[in-house]
Amino acid sequence: MSSINNPPPHLYTSSELDRASHRRREAGWIAERLHDPASRVLPMFGLKVLADLEGDPALAWQAPTDIDGIGAMEPLFLGLQDGIAHFAVEVGGRDDGHLDYVEVRSIGRTVTRRDAGLAAYARALVHWRAKHLHCGACGKRTRPIDGGHARHCDGCGLDSFPRTDPAVIVLVSDGDRCVLGRSARIPAGIYSTLAGFMEPGESMEQTVAREVFEEVGIEVDNIRYRSSQPWPFPQSLMLGFQASARHQPLRLDPEEIEDARWFTREELLDPETRPVQLPNTDSIARYLIDEWLDGDV
Ligand SMILES: [Zn+2]
C-alpha cells in the first residue's frame, strides 16, 4: 500500500490532500471555513470546473466570501490542502473573460497534478450528489450532512454515501506481444487495454479472467495487480493488472468489442511508425502499456 510519502503515480489522485474527515461533522467549523476569505472554492457548472484558460490553464479557485449565498448552495468540503479548506460548489453562470467551465479531462494534463486530483474528486462528489437528491428507498428529497459527504432522508432515515464502482483494466501479453482492442465507445484509431466492471461476488482476479475471456476469448494466468487510478468519469476506480495469455488465437465478441489484435513491442515502441494510436497519457491504460513496453513487468 502506498503511503502519503510515496504517492501512486497516476493523475486524478489527490495524494497531498488531508481529507480531514473528522471535521466534516462539525457544522460550525465548516460554516467558519465558508466565512474565511483564505478558504478556496472551486465553482462548478454541472460536472464542469471553472478554469482560467489564459496562458497555462489553471483551476479558477475563488474565495467563498466572493460567492453570494454560498451557504445555501450545499458546498462540498473536499479537505485541507496546506491547512487551507477547499470546497466545491455548483454555481454556474460566473464565467467571464478568460474564465470558462471545462471538462476535467480537457485540462487534466495541463493543470498542476494537485489541481487535477482536486478537480477529479470534486467531479465525483458532484456527480454522486446529482444522482442522490432524492431518497432511493422512499423518494423524499434528501439533505446534505457531513460537509456534503453523505445525504440524509428525513422521511425514512436512510443515509446515502458517495459511490465508487470498481473496474479492472488489464494488459494481456504472451511476452513479446500484447493484446490491445477498441470498443465503439472510444475515439476512432485508439487501441487500448481490455477493461470491465466487477460484478457482485467476484474477486478482482476473477473479473480480469472473465472480462478477457468474454471480450477476446482467451484464458489468462499469472494475473498481477499493478496499481489503481480514480476515474471519476463518472464514478469508477480502475484497478490495473498485467496478465499472461495461455494461448494466442483471439475470438472477439462483437457485442463487447469492435476490434482487438496482437501487437509486437517493436510495432508499438516508435510513436512515428505505430500502426494505431495509444490511449491518452492521463490514463492508467497508457501506464500499463508503457510499463510493458519498457520491459518493467
Ligand atoms: Zn427515504
Image (spheres, helix red, strand yellow):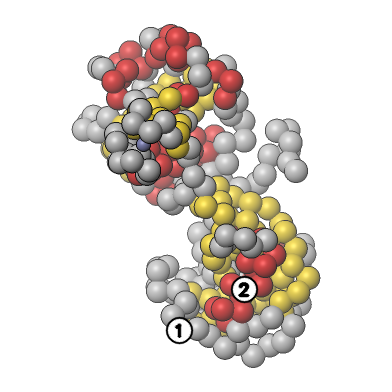
Q: Quadrant of residue 223?
A: bottom right
Q: Quadrant of residue 174?
A: bottom right
Q: Residue at x 68, y 39 (%)?
A: 7
Q: CB under 8 Å between callouts 1 and 2? A: no
- Quarter of image, ligand 1: top left
What secondary structure is found at the residue carrying circle 2? helix
The answer to whether 209 appears left or right of 127 in the picture is right
Q: Quadrant of residue 126?
A: top left
Which x, y percent locates residue 231? 51, 50
- Under mark 2, the amino acid is Arg
Query: Is any part of residue 232 visible from this angle?
Result: yes
- Would you name the residue on which mark 1 appears? 254
Q: Residue at x 60, y 63 (%)?
A: 169
Extreme front residue here?
156
- Would you name the residue on which mark 2 appears? 210
Closest to the observer: 235 or 270? 235
The answer to whether 130 appears left or right of 295 in the picture is left
Q: Earlier in the sequence, mark 1 or mark 2?
A: 2
Q: Residue at x 41, y 42 (%)?
A: 128
Closest to the observer: 114 or 141? 141
Depicted 47 relative to depicted 41: above or below: below
Depicted 255 relative to depicted 234: above or below: below
Closest to the observer: 34 or 207? 207
Which x, y percent locates residue 136? 37, 44
Mark pair 1, 2: CA separation:
16 Å
